[in-house]
Image: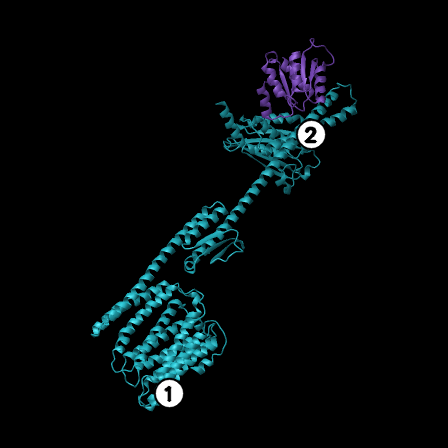
Chain colours: A purple, B cyan
Amino acid sequence: MSAPGGEIGSRPVILAADDDEDILELVTFRLGRSGYTVVQARDGAEALQLAKEHKPDLAVLDVGMPKLDGLEVTRQLRAQEETSAIPIILLTAWVQESDVEQGFAAGATDYVRKPFSPMELVARVQAALR
Amino acid sequence: VVGIATNLGTRREPDVLARRDRIWWLAAGGAGLLLSLAYALIPEHKTVLRECVYALVALSGGAAVLVGVHRYRPRAPRAWSLIGLGLLAWSAGDIVWSAYAVADAAVPYPSASDGLYALGYALLIAGFGAAVGARRAEQDWKILLDTLAVMLAGLLIVWVYVVEPVIHVQDATWQAKLFSLLYPLADVVVTAFAAFLFLGTSWRAVSMQLLMIGLVGTLVADIVYYTGTSLRGVERGDVVYLISLTFLALAALHPSMRALTDPSEEGAGLDSRKRIVTLGFVLPVPLVVLAVQNARGEPLYVEAVIAFGGALSFVALLRIDRLLAEVKRSADASRSLTRFSAEMLSAKDDAQLVSKANHVVDELVHHGRASVVQPPDTGGTPHAFAAPVSVEGVPVAEVVADVGPRELEAVEEPLATVASQLALALERMRGISRERELVESLRSQNEELAELDRMKNRFVSSTSHELRTPLTSIVGYLELLLGGEAGELNEEQQHFLEIVNRNCDRLNKLVDDVLFMGRVDSDRMTLEPSEVDLGALVRAEVAALAGAARLKGIDLQCDVQAGELPTITGDATRLTQLLDNLLTNSIKFTPAGGAVTATVTGDAGHVRVAVSDTGVGIPADELPRIFERFFRASTTAAFSGTGLGLPIAAAIAEAHGGNISVVSDVGTGTTFTIELPVRPADDTLIMRATNEMEAATT
């Protein structure tokens, strides 16, 4: 589950979760190029499990995922002490005020609406890690 | 009179005299009256002439009745024929009498005349009997009681003034006594018949009125005979008799003569007032007789007076008792019917209506049984009363009663009323339920349509969201390519990918706009109100678009009113979206070298933003449609766009309680003006959002 270009431990680890393989690869590639190690999850349950396993420095979660959606994953991460401090960026295709509100209410640090510019995502990640 | 009457022909016609016939009819009456008068005026010594005139009138009168029968052909012609023959028999008796007079012979008593008179009475009584028999269907026992009362009164009078004196005459033969009694007694019978007809017959028929006058006249003539002198000269009774006979003839010659035997249409025997008045005249007769006898110093015949008077009182009491019962009955029925009318309005369904009707018909009938049968009783035993209850021409129920004829008479009308009221109520009920069904079907149709609309909105919304996922990959990888992440691109590759990128932007914008319109449609547009400085907002937006304008060679200017410009309550993001839509449009549709200007003005109540360009313009006939979704002016065909920019701008302006307007000339340019209230009304979306926010913070 490691991204090309680095080992876990030497670089900041980012958990990326999206059920769309292409988007997951896009995120992984862009963040990898920008110097992050990416752990990939394809649904909410896996994301939760990997988060506990790897204690990532940041999580990029798609909102609309099977099993557990991004909002629920965010809530559960926040609820557990070991993962409660991880900055979370939500990727959402549903960009209504209410969606955004729900995201922040669940404990998200930031959100990026789909479709997004990969570079913008990198900028948001950097900002969130700072 | 016969000749004249024959002239009338034999056509059958309605109960009104034709104009021509009326002349002859009046002439016949006039001739009869004139001849009667002439008879009275002819000097006593011209006996032959006088008796001839008498004979002429008397014979013509009887004959005229027979002519009337021939002419009008009543259903039961026997009655009038017998009456006519009876009158002829009387006339014959008179002629025989005249023969005695002319011959100046001594007249025996009883004579041949008396035989003929008796025959005349017999025929007349038989005639009236036939008339009464022909109208059997309309008779009721009350008429019989009333007639009995009249007859008792008549008998009392005859008893006191004729029978008693005649019985006490010492020197008369028994034959003379017999005839002396026969005439008045027969008169009483004729009077009874007259009373019977008077009480039971339709009084509107001219013929019946004339007949009554004639009969009364005949009786008066008889009374005049009894009380008149025994002079053999001009008897006043004779004159009265001739005049009466004229009336009887006129009655028979009138087309309404059929009323004597034919059933009347308006229903006889219902006029109680007429009968009460009659009883009122009859009841005091015993007292009057006593008074008269007492005044004349004659014997009082107390036993007879008591006997007849007692019987009379008994009949009258019986009548009054029945009358009161009838009145009470009818009041009860009317109360029941009124209550029924009210109950029908409150009934919930057909079953309740029928059960209430059942209750009321049961209440109406005192002796016997009545009910509402549903469905109508087709087979089975016939009922004394049956009224169909039809809804829209189809019998759905039937009001039936098994009662005796006397009870039937009392309940027939209220039962028929119940039947027709029930029919009306059932029909009304059917109308109501039909209306309900209609409303229900419209409501469910409406719901289906609303559901379809919601489905459409959901479909549009989810499809648009789904579009974003592939779009994310397209846009993302495109950026990687364009950023050289997959190796250097040559110039052509770069150019082509930029075209792809531009169209991705368009697609993305279209998805955004469609989603936004979907939110407007499903009332899910939400606003985040704050105090907005529109001047600053316009300046920022113009600055943001300055680059694009410069690239296209367009002079983009911003002109914000100097001095105090009020802030408005609004959603800055949405207002920016609105301004962006308008300014982007203007830049897009304005050729290079043109100008786009955003002007902001305001007063205490409103702030206006006008976006003017020197672009292609919009044809006047298309102006009313430009705020419709996906409508694109013909002049903008060469430009790309979603066709949703203006509807979205309008929706945002309206959500703020404002409006948008447009002025345009093809080739000259277009100006869009939005006008927003500084303090929107309470029912605007922005105000509702503000109130929600305030409610949330307090």
Quarter of the image for the N terminus of chain B: give it: bottom left
Q: Quadrant of residue A93?
A: top right
Instruction: Look at the image and tell me whether residue B425 can be seen.
Output: yes
Q: Residue B692: where, in percent of width, then height?
A: 51, 27
Image-quadrant location for residue B97: bottom left
- Three-letter code for the amino acid on which mark 1 is drawn: Cys
Q: Residues within 10 Å of mark 2 (few under 14, many from 20)?
A: some
Q: Is residue A56 visible?
A: no
Say left or right for B477 vs B580: right
- Residues at marks 1 and 2, CA–CA distance in whole angstroms: 130 Å
Camera-side residue of A76 and B284: B284
Circle nearer the N terminus (1, 2)? 1
> Observer-nearest residue: B324 or B523?
B324
Amino acid tagged 2: Leu
Q: Where does label 2 land, which residue?
A: B507
Tell me where residue B152 appears, x and y as whole percent.
31, 69
Circle 1 sits on which residue? B52
- Please give the name of the residue rendered at 50% of the width and 23% of the height, measured from the top-left corner: B697
Chain under callout 2: B
Badge 1 density bin: few <14, some 14–19, many ≥20, Cα 10 Å? some
Mark 2, secondary structure of its residue:
helix
- Frontmost residue, B313 versus A32: B313
Chain letter, disc 1 residue:
B
